[in-house]
Amino acid sequence: MTFDVVVIGGGPAGRALARACAGEGLHTAIVDRHPHRPWTATYGAWADELPADTPIKSASTTVRAYAREEHLIQRTYVVLDNAKLHELPDTVQVLQRPEAARHTFNATGARKGRAEQTAVGTVIESDSTETTLMDWRGNGDTFLYTVPLGGNRLLVEETCLAGRPAKPLPELRERLHARLAPGEEEERVRFPLDAPRVAGNAFGAAAGFVHPATGYSVATSLRLAPLVAAAIKANENPKHVIWPIKARIVHAMRMRGLEALLRFGPDETLDFFEVFFRLEPEHQRAYLSGREDVKGTAAAMLALFRTAPGHLRWKLPR
């Protein structure tokens, strides 16, 4: 038996692609050796990055960021519904090993890189479950990240946005517990920001979807999965959808931004994010979410360079 599509890897990206291909009527299989294992990670995204049918567990219409001052971010932030993202239609066959297919995609996650993001979080009960918060005060080299999970549950994480090497998990745990008592659940995060793309057909983090400035990749996977499936259905090359030339240019620009961030010390990091959160909303949105927006990304980086104080400017990409 030859499948139209075999997806290797049963995470959010792999399952999104398998669902989309099945929805196009393609004979689809997914390789997942532990298909019933629940996901414990929390996947979040800006709401405007996602397809309209994305299952949402909770949403924050108020997003606040603190660097030197408080900033209100005019975007809705959401936490995805893991259980629904995990679901597959009956037409997708689950395999324990790859089989022959016209198109095989590696969706097994990011390869090892040099720069990493790390975080340790705990889930607590709280009445403050309407606002997503990013707070760099106190520790410029890490920040406190809180996001509502629905009901009265709140995820609180101590996060190292980017490091080479990143902050060790035990240190982040110690910093977090210095702020608040541990809850019943703990979440640990560690993944590369500059991992190379896997050779051949790949999707999700394995294809290099991880945003070097934020670490996010799931929203990109969910948005691109239907487009890749449609390309396969039309007998077109899916690589043109996965990495069009504009996306390659923007990714290279973002990688330069990562290199600048890695050069900052704690106080400089505070100053950098103070400048970033003062940018016009369209500049912030372009840099964080405009995967193929070359013009918008360049404008955002130029605006950041022009408004940055002198002690930061010489470290920023020109």
Image: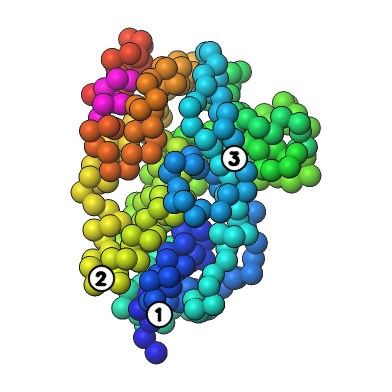
Magenta: main secondary structure equals helix
Picture disc at residue 27: 1
Image x and y of residue 266, in percent: 50, 20
Is residue 268 visible in the rendered image? The answer is no
1 or 3: mark nearer the eye: 3
Q: Residue furthest top?
A: 310
**Residue 234 - label:** 2
**Nearest the camera: 235 or 209?**
235
Stretch of the chain drawn in magenta: 298-304
Residue at (31, 78) in percent of width and height: 102
- For mark 1, give the secondary structure: loop
Q: Which of marks 1 and 2 is in front?
A: 2
Residue 195 x, y percent position in the rendering = 39, 49
Q: Find residue 224 and report its horizontal and vertical position in percent.
A: 37, 55
Q: In which quarter of the image is residue 246?
A: top left
Q: In which quarter of the image is residue 36?
A: bottom right
Which quadrant holds the C terminus? top left
151 left or right of 283?
right
Distance CA(mark 1)–CA(mark 2):
14 Å
Q: Distance between the residues labelled 1 and 3?
A: 35 Å
Q: Is residue 10 rendered to the left or right of residue 195?
A: right
The crowd level at tag 3 (other Cα within 10 Å; few <14, some 14-19, many 20+) is: many
Task: Please state which amino acid type lies under the numbered disc 3.
Answer: Ala
Cα separation, mark 3 vs mark 2, equals 36 Å
**Residue 224's mark?**
none
The residue that appears at 46% across and 67% down in the rendered structure is 19
Graded by Cα atoms within 10 Å as few (under 14), some (14 to 19) or many (20 or more), the crowding at tag 1 reads: some
Quarter location, residue 168? top right
Of the 4 image quadrants, the one containing the N terminus is bottom left
Residue type, label 2: Ala
What residue is shown with label 3? 59
